[in-house]
Amino acid sequence: MGTAYIVRKRARFVSINGPVNLRYGTPVDAVDGFLVHNGRPLCAVTSESAHRYFARNDDGNGKARGALIGAITAKLERKDAGHQMRWDLLWSDPEAQKLRHPDHADFWLWGHAFFEADMADLEHVAGLIGARR
């Protein structure tokens, strides 16, 4: 059995084996680099679909981790008066930098490390930008 994951928001997408529709909270496993449900591979652990719909749950914090990931990304997408300030805070924070995709020096993309991060790291980022779950 691989690393446990959980559906962090309804997973409706076309998987590598066809359409899937998994409810929030559905457990899935990681096997050989793929997320698997009922023996059926869904997507690569590092894929956009995995990042969008699933959260690591090997520590029992999958629902909370998924909620924080959602809150952080939603807060950063908000185009209000504090938009640039939030991004400036991220760019200047060494802890947040560790979660950024390493291949893009001048553009912020979350790396796989963000989606696999410990709760303390996600809570740090959420606190930095004022995101609430």
Image: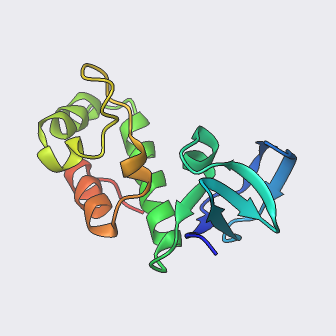
Q: Residue at x 13, y 43 (%)?
A: 93
Instruction: State how the image is colored.
Output: rainbow
Residue occupying the far top of the picture: 106
Q: Residue at x 21, y 41 (%)?
A: 97
1 horizontally vs 64: left or right: right
Query: Total of numbered circles in the picture?
Result: 0
Question: Residue 120's x, y, as percent?
Answer: 26, 67
The quadrant the N terminus occupies is bottom right
87 horizontally vs 115: left or right: left
Residue occupying the far front of the picture: 32
Q: Residue at x 22, y 59 (%)?
A: 124
Residue occupying the far right of the picture: 18
Residue 92 in which image quadrant: top left
Residue 103 in which image quadrant: top left
88 horizontally vs 36: left or right: left
Question: Residue 69's x, y, as percent?
Answer: 44, 54
Question: Residue 101's x, y, as percent?
Answer: 34, 35
| In-front residue for pair 117/69 | 117
Residue 116 in which image quadrant: bottom left
Question: Residue 3's x, y, as percent?
Answer: 55, 70
| In-front residue for pair 44/48 | 44
Q: Residue at x 23, y 45 (%)?
A: 98
126 horizontally vs 5: left or right: left
| In-front residue for pair 52/71 | 52
The quadrant the C terminus occupies is bottom left
